[in-house]
Amino acid sequence: MNKFLKLFPGRSPVHAGKKAEIVNLSTNLQRRRFMQGVGGLTLGVGLSPLLGTPRALAAGKAEAFAPNAFLRIGADGVVTVISKHLEMGQGAYTGMATLVAEELDADWSRVRVEGAPANTKLYANLAFGAQGTGGSTAIANSFEQMRRAGATARAMLVAAAAQKWNVPADSLTISNGVVTHAASGRKAGFGELAQAAAKLPVPADVKLKTPDQYKLIGKQKLPRQDTAGKTDGTAIFTQDFKLPGMLVAVVAHPPRFGAKVKSFDAAKAKAIPGVVAVVPIEGTPHSMAGVAVLAKNTWVARQGRDALQVQWDETRAYAKGSEQILAQYREALKQPGLMARKDGDIARGLAQPAKLIEAEYSVPFLAHAAMEPMNCLVKLGNGECEIWNGEQWQTVDQARVAGLLGIPPEKVKLNQLYAGGSFGRRANPQSDYLLEAVQIAQGAKKQNINAPVKMVWTREDDMRGGYYRPIFLHQMKLALDASGRPQALHVRMAGQSIMKGIGFDIMIKDGVDVTSVEGMANLPYDIPNLQVELHTPEDVGVPIQWFRSVGSTQNGFAGEGIIDEAAVLAGKDPVAFRRDLLSHHARHRGVLELAAAKAEWDKPLAPGKAGAATGERRGRGVAVHEAFGSFVAQVAEVTVAADGTYKVDRIVCAVDCGVAVNPDVIRAQMEGGIGYGLSLALSGAITVKDGVVEQSNFHDYTVLRINQMPKIEVYIVPSTEKPTGVGEPGTPPTAPAVVNALFQATGKRIRTLPIGDKVV
Amino acid sequence: MATLNVNGKNLSVNGSDDMPILWALRDELNMTGTKFGCGMALCGACTVLLDGTPIRSCVTPVSVAKGKKITTVEALTSSPAGKAVQKAWRELDVVQCGYCQSGQMMSATALLTSNPHPTDADIDAAMSGNVCRCATYVRIRAAIHEAGKTL
């Protein structure tokens, strides 16, 4: 599989019959540049040493030393790292700062981080060729670039000190933010040298440390950069950011995807004190229609929204439901699909099996349900637009907003704020919620309201707003030979394409959306006859989008489920069975063996507290999966009560993500990724009925709570491989590990998620 | 116009008495540490203390707070338990996205104030109303135990 493809997640047609065309963008020249950027993604795997030009020094900061676009050092010695990646919880700010500070030999307690503005030239993700955060690429694409940024600054500080003291540069050392000349005992902090360093030429090439010289990279507990502000209420999210005179907009959205506003009565809304305006929005091919109520505060705006009476035009709305979608997929799977993988001869492999498994797996729509519902603050000027947002995909958002406004992308200024979670949602490939906010501001302007507008979605808006992890259906046949070894695996799967029809054709290989099949088309097991076919329905009008770990959410579940079924049918130990089939995949095997050893897989599982006499059963299950270049294995332990209720007691996790830059962040991401995976395994489901989303808030879209969180142990495989991501890879193995454990406990094979409250 | 006692200060709030405390704090008093998550008392992101008791400010009208004292995350360290909570949260680097953590810390502070050495079951009971989508629960639990050691 193309290396880039694994790095990059995707999206889908928005509304039925209205394929989201990037054509809007094609009307101006910028589109070409944008597409070149996207096309450049494949080339982006090689790291460019480009660090950008020195930043223009901000007024009042004339003393600052800013040797490149990624850091500046003030006269006070404080090092400010400019993060091109969004901090949405995964520790990107800490990661960027670690890489810069390592080569700079900075004092960690005097390092700060700021989010970068939108500027694709300076801040492109080298894995994408566009500015954005996702696909677990932050550390991977920045590893060399940020270290080089730090090393450049270091060389200039050393040169400045050498000049000042008239000594050779190689007689100087730097440690913890202090330059020392050992022979004379002279010392200078970064702040004292910043002004002189700023006057020196930027060196063209610098030497990076060798791993044995690392002081911060790999340090077990380097404090996170964002903890202080997130533990005293001062961290600013979009929800918190305010401008003078700003109005808040809360929007009435249609009940079905693709509906438009037919008419509305705003009299009751306008009668509420504090309501300033009612603004209908048309929607775009990428964002919803609706009616927005603008008010001086959120509560009033919401009251106003609730008082609106809107008639919807549902002529083009999608009116089917999850059950019909599944039935449609089942019908489609009767026919061959597009080939995503073809090893050997599947017909011959399945012809005379000693044993055969036929199984159907399915997963529902899932909402990301980040704690901060979508929101966006927009200030429209003349021929320009300024936006404040937890901004995850600057290049795309800039281009789409510019397209809507008919202005050049560089006239769309994006200001970076913290995001209260995202899990992919804020990197919407349609820029849906940004376009909605901009359209509201445009509508307000038509009513001579020029105030900045902050659009605030309620939880219900967020949960019913679409852009879900798509429904997937897998039908599989697996044949074992007489020795119990898999001879053939035939997978037919169906689900909406995230990438098709939106300008990301680079992610479509021979008609196959690589993100649909990732984790299945690259199944690592030695199976001589292996065929994966994909059906991509294009008439499902529920908007979908990448979700933490993308295709691996469904394929990790189906793949690790069927292989576990095979182990059981072969009468073999699930760990040994997998290990034997991973002879060509040392890193899969490495995490599998580590997780099994730490979980004491070879010893019997201790009985539960209630004891077998009460009908209580315990079980242990395993899963191993590669996602975004990282390898994760998990062993889950469960206890099932006599009535079928169950608890996940413990998950032991082993991860191989190459060089472990921030081990504590890696552990946190495995803990969080497991929690996210457990949430979707136990109860996560968005269901659509007659075109209407049945869930609306956390009472009917239940998510994991602390009482359901198992004990978690995380082990990191020591590695000298290039670092890979950790934001997503912790999620895929959790659901299959739990399902496999429940099978061991009960003999009941679960092939449909979510599992629900009971195993019966 | 209502008067709220927030973090020891009497503050005037524009708006009707039925406005939830959450929006009075965030939009009228400019104290944005307390977060909006669900609007239905389902997620706990909006948790503040009312006379020391954790409440969901997204569904509690301003009128309920008359004559009572509200404590928000901005004054977390005004109590020994709150101070211990913040310290433990920082030492263990509990946060990820951080959006729910104000609410988590307020609930944890209330728990530790009444029960400085809670069991895991006590923690489950006191904290299961606070959702964290980053699933920082392992560290929340550890941080509460850690904070308890200093109380």
Image (spheres, coloured by chain):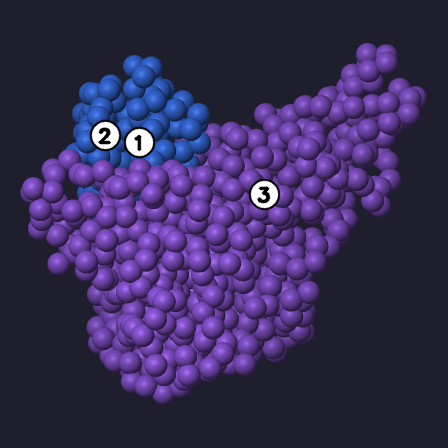
- Disc 3 on helix, strand or loop? loop
Which chain letter goes with mark 2? B
Chain identifier matching the blue colour in the rendered picture: B
Seen at 73% across and 55% down, the residue is: A48
Whether residue A436 is situated above or below residue A708 in the rendered picture: below
| Kind of residue sitting beneath label 3 | Ser
Q: Report which residue position mark 3 lands on.
A: A719
Mark 3: few/some/many CA within 10 Å (<14, 14-19, 20+): few
Question: In the picture provided, is A124 more to the left or to the right than A388?
Answer: right
Q: Is residue A123 above or below residue A216?
A: below
Between circles 3 and 1, the one closer to the viewer is 3
Q: Which residue is mark 1?
A: B141
Co-location on one chain, circles 3 and 2: no
Q: Where is A366 relative to B114, above or below?
A: below
Mark 2: which secondary structure?
helix
- Please state the chain letter of the residue tagged with numbered disc 3 in the rendered image: A
Find the distance from the CA under tag 2 to the CA under tag 1. Answer: 8 Å
How many residues crowd mark 2 within 10 Å: few (<14), some (14–19), many (20+)?
some
Q: Are marks 2 and 1 in contact (CB under 8 Å)?
A: yes
- Cα separation, mark 3 vs mark 1, equals 30 Å
- List x then y, in percent, for residue A543: 38, 71
Q: Colour in which chain A is shown?
A: purple
Marks 3/2: CA distance? Answer: 35 Å
Q: Is residue A48 left or right of residue A15?
A: right
Q: Nearer the viewer, residue A230 or A682?
A: A682
Name the residue tied to disc 2.
B120
Q: Could you tell me the amino acid type at mark 1?
A: Arg
Which numbered mark, 3 or 2, is in the foreground of this view?
3
The quarter of the picture where residue A254 lies is: bottom left
Residue at x-position 40% and y-position 33%: B94
Residue drawn at x 60%, y 50% is A140
